[in-house]
Image: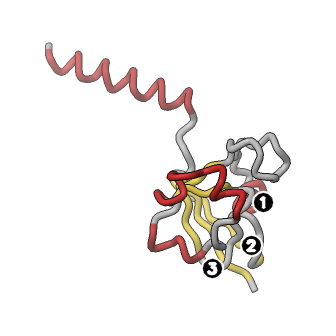
């Protein structure tokens, strides 16, 4: 059985088999999610977020996720290497730090320009 997962903000969607991890689905769709631990919940680099309406489309939190994420888990944050796709899912990828810095600088510049 196949399900779809959509990665936001790109909107890219890929079909995968039930039980595929979010990280494996991202790799299949050529979306980069950083990871250093080989999918063992060790590095915490592969954090993604899902909203409550799509949370049931992912497997339950693993004990490793609960330990590692702590209070973030209650905010819908998951480890892509541990969360398995059970239904049609949507996950939010964090913004690239460099892109975030550029975006903030451009916003600040636009605000300054608006003052003149």
Mark 3 to mark 2 CA distance (whole Å):
10 Å
Rendered location of residue 92, percent (x, y): 53, 55
Residue 51 position, x and y percent, is 46, 64
Of label 2 and label 1, which has the lower sequence position?
2
Packing grade of label 2 (10 A; few <14, some 14-19, many >=20) is many
- Element type where label 1 sits in the image: helix
Residue found farthest to the left: 116
Model colouring: secondary structure
Q: Identify the residue shown where x is 22% and y is 17%.
A: 113
Q: Looking at the rendering, which quadrant does residue 61 occupy?
A: bottom right
- How many marks are shown on the rendered structure? 3
The answer to whether the residues at label 1 and label 3 have Cβ atoms under 8 Å apart is no
**Which of the two discs, 3 and 2, sits closer to the camera?**
3
* Residues at discs 2 and 1 in contact (Cβ within 8 Å): yes
Which residue is at 68% across, 42% downward? 45
Q: Looking at the rendered structure, which numbered label has been put on residue 24?
A: 1
Residue linked to disc 2: 16
User: Compared with residue 49, is residue 99 higher up or lower down, i.e. above or below?
Assistant: above
The numbered dot on residue 87 is 3
């Amino acid at each position: 059985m196949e399900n779809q997962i959509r990665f936001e903000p790109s909107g890219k969607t890929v079909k995968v088999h039930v039980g595929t991890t979010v990280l494996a689905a991202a790799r299949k769709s050529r979306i980069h999610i950083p990871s250093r631990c080989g999918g063992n919940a060790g590095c915490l680099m592969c954090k993604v977020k899902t909203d409550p309406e799509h949370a049931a489309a992912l497997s339950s939190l693993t004990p490793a996720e609960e330990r590692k994420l702590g209070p973030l888990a209650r905010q819908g944050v998951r480890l892509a290497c541990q969360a398995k796709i059970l239904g049609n899912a949507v996950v939010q990828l964090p913004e690239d730090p460099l892109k975030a810095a550029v975006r903030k600088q451009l916003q600040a510049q636009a605000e300054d320009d608006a003052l003149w």
